[in-house]
Image: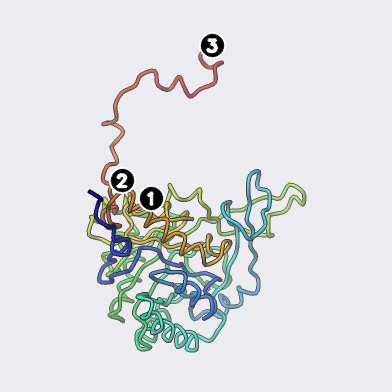
Amino acid sequence: MAPPAFDRAGALRVRVGPLALKNPVVCASGEHVMTEAGIRAALGAGAAVVVAKSINESAAARRQLAQTDYLRAGAGWQPLPWRGSGGSILCRSGLQPRDSADWIAAVAALDREARAHDAYVAASVILADLDAAVSLAREIEAAGIRLLEFNVGTPYGDEAAHGGVTTERAAEKVGAQVAAIRRAVGIPVWVKLTGQSENVAALAAAARDGGATAVTMIGRMLGMLPDLDTMAPALDTNLGYGGDWALPLTCYWLARSRKRLGADAPLIGTNGARSGADVARMLLAGASAVELCSAVLTGGFGVLGAAVDELADYLERKRCRAPDLVGRAADRVLPYAELPARAEHWRAFVPAETLGD
């Protein structure tokens, strides 16, 4: 007798706090969603949420867009063509240059359109001045936008001019910042955290205590790559650094945050996911949804639809639903003291000379 037909669409559905999403694939904020056309392309590709390009009140942060540059590097740190998959991404970025009121109105209109796709278009505010962020959050809610991402962890806070953006590493400040936003608005607020911290789980707990609906982790690192030919820094300065190498780091902090906050606290993974298989990995680590950014920048919006399809294929093979994955690997992490003893196992992983052979 044939097994019952698998409900792929139903298997993909997840919840992130009060929001029911058609799948856990989120198109993250970035230059690819700087325009209405880009946001519509992300919706058309099947993303459940599209986070529009970020804004804040800082003119310096908006001007930074004119000084951006981007590098995709492969083996041996050799530059790769920008269009393609894989590799490490090094870049500097800026914010949406349009007038904030104009962009908020555009995002609100796109969020209304998104209802036809069973999707959301979220506004994104990057922290610079907290009072200004609160005012923008109120404008966003008043415009009818249904979801806000509040980014307190952009990688460029130490590099940006005139305090135009913030990389917040202090848990008590994260809690106070999130609480101020939550007092101002009633819509769901996703709080995006830096990865430049010795304890991302503590930042996540502070964000949750402040009222975050969900916590997104982890933002990219800062890096600097010397160019051997010019002997100067690649792209002339310090850069945000991400890539598929970051996936185990993100999964580590997802699992640690799940353990600290509890299984009911919604987490969103970002940094390192490039495919539907990577989305599944972050779900297993504790995420309820996963943001993709660099893969879309370099590979186009079709990456989003391919990720949804690949995840659905995986769920069908495993005969399970996306919510069934959430935290399954995280909950099986063993302390080192509980691992089986294999006294001579290390010998298989060293050069022969180490053993005197």
Judge by depth and name the residue closer to the eye, 72 or 99.
Answer: 72
Determine contact: label 1, label 2, CB under 8 Å: yes
Point out the tag, 1 or 3, that comes first from the N-terminus.
1
**Regarding mark 2 in the picture, which secondary structure is present there?**
loop
Report the disc number at residue 356: 3
Residue sitting at 46 percent across and 21 percent down?
348
**Regarding mark 3 in the picture, which secondary structure is present there?**
loop
Extreme-right residue of the structure: 229
Name the amino acid type tagged 1.
Arg
Extreme-top residue of the structure: 357
Q: Quadrant of residue 129?
A: bottom left
Q: Taking 168 as reference, is 259 left or right?
A: left
* Mark 1–mark 2 distance (CA, rounded to whole Å): 9 Å
Residue sitting at 44 percent across and 59 percent down?
307
Residue sitting at 45 percent across and 74 percent down?
43
Q: Crowding near pointer 2: few (<14 within 10 Å), some, many (20+)? A: some
* Mark 1–mark 3 distance (CA, rounded to whole Å): 40 Å
**Regarding mark 1 in the picture, which secondary structure is present there?**
helix
Residue 38 rendering spot, x and y as whole percentages: 53, 75
Report the disc number at residue 281: 1
Q: Is residue 265 above or below residue 20?
A: above
Residue 87 rendering spot, x and y as whole percentages: 58, 51
Residue 99 rendering spot, x and y as whole percentages: 53, 86
Foreground mark, 3 or 2, reads: 2
Name the amino acid type tagged 3.
Gly
Extreme-front residue of the structure: 1
Quarter of the image with the C terminus is top right
Report the disc number at residue 329: 2
Q: Is residue 337 above or below residue 97?
A: above
Report the disc number at residue 301: none
Q: Crowding near pointer 1: few (<14 within 10 Å), some, many (20+)? A: many
